[in-house]
Each structure stands twice: as C-alpha cells, then as structure tokens.
Image (cartoon, rainbow, N blue to C red):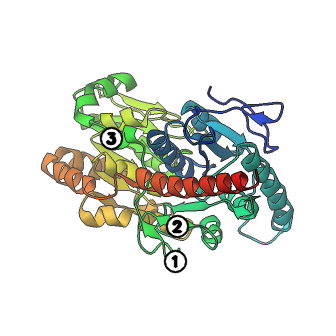
Amino acid sequence: MPPTGGGESGVPVNSAAGKAETVNSAPGDDTDGRPLSVVVAGGGTAGHIEPALAVADAVRRLAPHARITALGTTRGLETTLVPERGYELSLIPPVPLPRKPGLELARTPMRLARSVMATRRVLAAVDADVVIGFGGYVSIPAYLAAQSHLRARRRLPIVIHEANASAGIANKVGARFADAVLAAVDGSGLENARVVGIPVRGQITELDRPALRAKARHYFGLDEQAPTLLVFGGSQGAQQLNDAVAGAADALGRAGIGVLHAYGPKNSIAPVSPPDAPPYCGVGYLKRMDLAYAAADLVMCRSGAMTVAEVSATGLPAVYVPLPHGNGEQRLNALPVVEAGGGVLVDNDDITSDWVAREVPAMLADTERLAAMSVAASGTGHRDAATEVAQTALELAEKFHAGHRRRRGSRR
C-alpha cells in the first residue's frame, strides 16, 4: 500500500500501534521467515531522491520480498516522489546545515540529536539490516543512527553513494565509518571509494526515445514534427534559464522549434510566440521525465549529477548551464560528457535570450552534429550503477541478518 501522510516523530508513516506495516514482503526470504530490511536515505531534492529510488527499484528486482523503507522529512520532494513509487516512507526531523555562523548553527547539535534519536526508532521499528545513504540532510542522521544502532552487539552496516564530482559534508562524515563507499566518478574526495556511476532508474536507462517520440509529443501537446527543445532547471526550476528561453520564444517559434519548458513550481514564465509557431508548452514540474526526454531533440538544463546521468543515459545532446554557486561541482559533473562530445558547457551569465535565439536554432538545424553528440552522450556513464549499489547493500544485509540469526539461535 503506498505511504501517505505522517509526522516527524520517526515512526514509519504506514504504521499501526507502533508497528510498521510490511511493504513488498513475504515469508520464505530467510530461514527465520523475516525478509531483509533495507533503509534508503536520500531526501530533500530530486538529485538525492532519484538515485535512492533507483537503488530501491534494483533491490526490489534482486530481492523481491525485501522490505524497503525510505527516510525523509516533510520539507523534501520525497513526500510526493516516494509514495508515487510505492515505497514506505518514514519521516524524521530535518537538520539543515547552515553555511555561516549564527543562531541556526548553534541550534544544529540539538536538532541533530533529536533527528538521530528519531532515526534510531525507525531502524528499530523496521528491523533494519542495512542503511544506504545518498547525501543530503536526511543522510547525516541516518549514518549516525546506524553507526550507534546495535543489534545482538553488532553495528548496522552502512553503504554510501556519492553522486557528485565533489562530495558533500554528509557523505564525508558518513564515509569515516561506512562499510562500503561508492562514487559516481573518481576524485570525489571520499577515500577508497569504488566508482560505479550514478544509479538511474530503468525507466530512463531503457528508454526508447524514437519509439516513444510521437506519444510523448502528443502527451505534452507538442508539434509531432517540429524539432523540440526541452528546458528544465532541476526540481525547483532555474530563473536564469527561464528568463533566457522564454525571452527567446519569438525567435524559437520563427525557427519552427517547439519548446517543452519546466519552469519550477514556484516560478512563472510569459513566453510570446509568433502566430502559427509550434507550441511552447510550459509546466511547473515534469512528473513524466521519461516522456519529456522522449519528446526532445536537445536539452538545456543545469548540471546536477542526477540530471547529467539521466540526460546522457537517454543519449540526448545537451546544453549544460552549471549553477554559479557552491564549490563548482556542477561544472565538474558535466565535464566528462562535454569532453566526450555529448554536450556543451555555458556559464550561467552567458545564457541570455540573445544566446538562445542565436545558438539553439543553429544546433537543432545541424542534424549531423546532434547525431554525433547523441552517440557520445550514450557512451558515457554506467547503466548498471543501481544494480551494483543494490548488490553491495544486499550482501552486507545478508551477512548482518545471518549473524543476528546465529546469535539468536545460540541463546536458545
């Protein structure tokens, strides 16, 4: 049963009388009749949630009866995305990490302690056998809770996956005591990390864009014959991209280009296209990214790790516009694809309506270049990353589960 609602006490959303409801489980997975229990922690943005759900899907394929629980908070997109994928969701108090000294930073230790205690209650309630973390503000409580959560005098195993080219603070903390550290690329800053790529859901890695193109364009109300530009700035949109592309709507329309533009749920755009131009379709959020990719001939987007992984997995040529903030990880994320010839990098300040009006029609008109970029993009990445992460976690979970069972049997 898909999870619904819930608070931040650390009790699973699907629960009754304090006992969490089993999802995707059946007797016979183990000799004691209890299926393996896997907890994934990657809430907040889609960039953390999607890899977690891709691995959850892989766990479900490899161990169909395993219980899978996702950790999250009420502030993240997981409250929507996790239930939509049919997984149990347990909410814990969020622990944002302020970047500057101040009152919020002083409150962090107490908030973290509360969140760790809530997470330990979740781990106990679901009888967890392994925790898989993907960074973000849900992961630090998960790592600390797992590290201190003992069952039969044995610490709960931890698997970490770092999607970005430069590791965030949560994974840097967790990597110090994790049982397995995996990364998307070399040089992430996590010692002894095994490179496996970025977990991408099968719906994307197995996407047949040509076969779905007509259906996808009809779904969004696009012209089925016009070359199509897909624009999105991550789960929250990107104002610079919004302004630049919407401002070039007239030029794009005159060039016969259709546009599918996800501008962000809190933003708005006002494109003005010429009469008889292919449709310019604006949406707040794209729930069917598979169809969005299938509809497109070219993508303009930010270069978060998950975005780059999905776009390149579909073989789409892309214009990557890294966020100008942070430690430059978005530029690093896109570099391997760009250097392979599968995309171009453009600085945020250089993305203007004039640039879009001049460069995008030229790119879409050059079909040979687009075809070469598509082949190059498809050749990057690791399509089996989700399976590798899931296999690593399940091996640790099985050892932990078997050890717990032996200890319990010896006490009888």
Considering the numbered disc 2 on the image, is that residue within a helix, a strand or a loop? strand
- Disc 1 packing (10 Å; few <14; some 14–19; many ≥20): few
Residue type beneath disc 3:
Leu
In depth, the one of 367 and 114 nearer the eye is 114
Residue 181: mark in rendering? 2
How far across and down, in percent of the image, does residue 373 sit?
22, 54
The N terminus sits in image quarter: top right
Amino acid at the residue labelled 2: Val
Please tell me how crowded label 3 is: few (under 14), some (14-19), or many (20+) other residues with Cα within 10 Å: many
Q: Is mark 1 on a helix, strand or loop?
A: loop
| 76 to the left or right of 385 | right
Q: Nearer the viewer, residue 207 or 105?
A: 207
Q: Mark 3 points at which residue?
A: 229
**Mark 2 surroundings: few (<14), some (14-19) or many (≥20) residues within 10 A:** many
Say which residue appears at 27% left-offset and 41% top-offset: 297
Which residue is pictured at 59% across the width and 35% down the height? 87
What is the three-letter code of the residue carrying label 1? Glu
Determine whether label 1 and label 2 are within 8 Å by CB: yes
Please give left or right for residue 85 compared with residue 200 in the image. right
Looking at the image, residue 335 sits to the left or right of residue 43; the answer is left
Image coords of residue 191 (percent x, y): 52, 77
Q: Distance between the residues labelled 2 and 3?
A: 37 Å
Residue drawn at (44%, 69%) of the image: 194
- At horizontal 72% and vertical 32% (from top left) the residue drawn is 14
Instruction: Where is residue 78? Give x, y as percent.
Output: 62, 41
Q: Name the residue under label 1.
A: 191
Whichever of callouts 1 and 2 sits on the residue coming sooner in the sequence is: 2
SS under mark 3: strand
- Viewer-side residue, 298 vs 117: 117
